[in-house]
Amino acid sequence: MRTVSGFALVVSLAVAVSCADPVHDRAVDALGGEKAGVRQGPTHRPGQPCLTCHGGEGPGDLEMAFGGTLYAQQDSDAPGAGAVVRLLDSKNHTYDVTANCVGNFWVPRGAFASVYPVTAVATVQGFSRVMTTEMHRDGSCADCHVNPASAASPGHLWAAPADSDLPASDCKGDEDVKGVASKLATCTMVTPSCAAPFPTYTKDVAPILEANCVGCHQAKGQNPNPSLTSYRLVSALKTRVTMNTLVAQCRMPPPPLDPLSDGDRQTLACWIAGGAKQ
């Protein structure tokens, strides 16, 4: 009897221990306490990794698929209140969600049946920034986007240039966020079939950029970096590779703008394949 009772006790303790996740518990504890004067809810803990508490393991009640905080500018703690974050999955489905008065935004689990990888576009007061990398499994933005920027982090999420004049946020009480799922016009990856003579910048590429890209990618545009106003700038290796990847994957021009035509994307790909001649 003593042996059976002792065995039963050991089993009971093993089951109890197996139900806990000390790694997750430590991650929750590392977030610290609530900020004074801010209760738990839609406006609490801006800038923290939302899915640590809301990813299904608790202690947050609302389970999220994606969540983060958007700031107005790169070197500012001002929130990107009212900004629209568009998530774009590998099947060309989108989900638009509006950041609340502290910049918090989230997508409840099950609201967006996304297929990874997923990218994002953030738009505030007419300014847009496109996520140039991909989320492959984790929808908690602050797991990667941590201040200050460093070799390990690009810094917090932001949308507007430093010199933009954005209205201050007037945050009164808890504010929820709104989201809606949608689908973009069909845009499939282009597999270039290129042959000499290859396109040139002056004759073939510049007109495409002028009609679709330079309005934003110039010194006085919404997204001056990178500038696409000259052959020297466009032919830089990093710019060429980035441009081709984003255009081929239908992430530039940013949604909800229409993607480039198949023909224009083919021209850009073949220009790069042919050595990016002027």
Image (tube, rainbow, N blue to C red):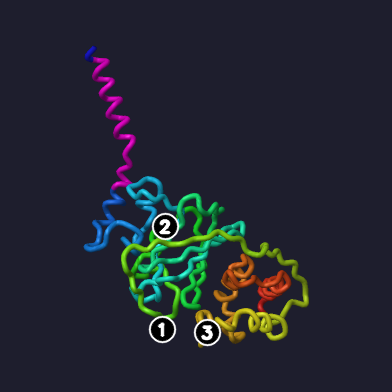
Dot 1 amino acid type: Asp
Which SS type dominates the magenta stretch? helix
Q: Which percent across, then down, holds residue 202?
A: 69, 86
Name which of mark 1 and mark 2 comes first in the sequence.
2
Quarter of the figure that contains the N terminus: top left
Residue 233: mark: none
Q: Which percent across, then down, holds residue 273?
A: 68, 72
Graded by Cα atoms within 10 Å as few (under 14), some (14 to 19) or many (20 or more), the crowding at tag 2 reads many
Place residue 10 in its image quadrant.
Answer: top left
Q: Are marks 3 and 2 in contact (CB under 8 Å)?
A: no
**Can you identify the residue that label 3 sits on?**
221
Residue 201 forms part of the magenta stretch = no
Q: Is residue 74 visible?
A: yes
**Can you identify the residue that label 1 sits on?**
165
How far apart in space, not on screen, are marks 1 and 3 (Cα)? 14 Å
How far apart in space, not on screen, are marks 1 and 2 (Cα)? 29 Å
Residue at 41% over, 50% down: 63
Q: Is residue 150 visible?
A: no
Q: Are marks 1 and 2 in contact (CB under 8 Å)?
A: no
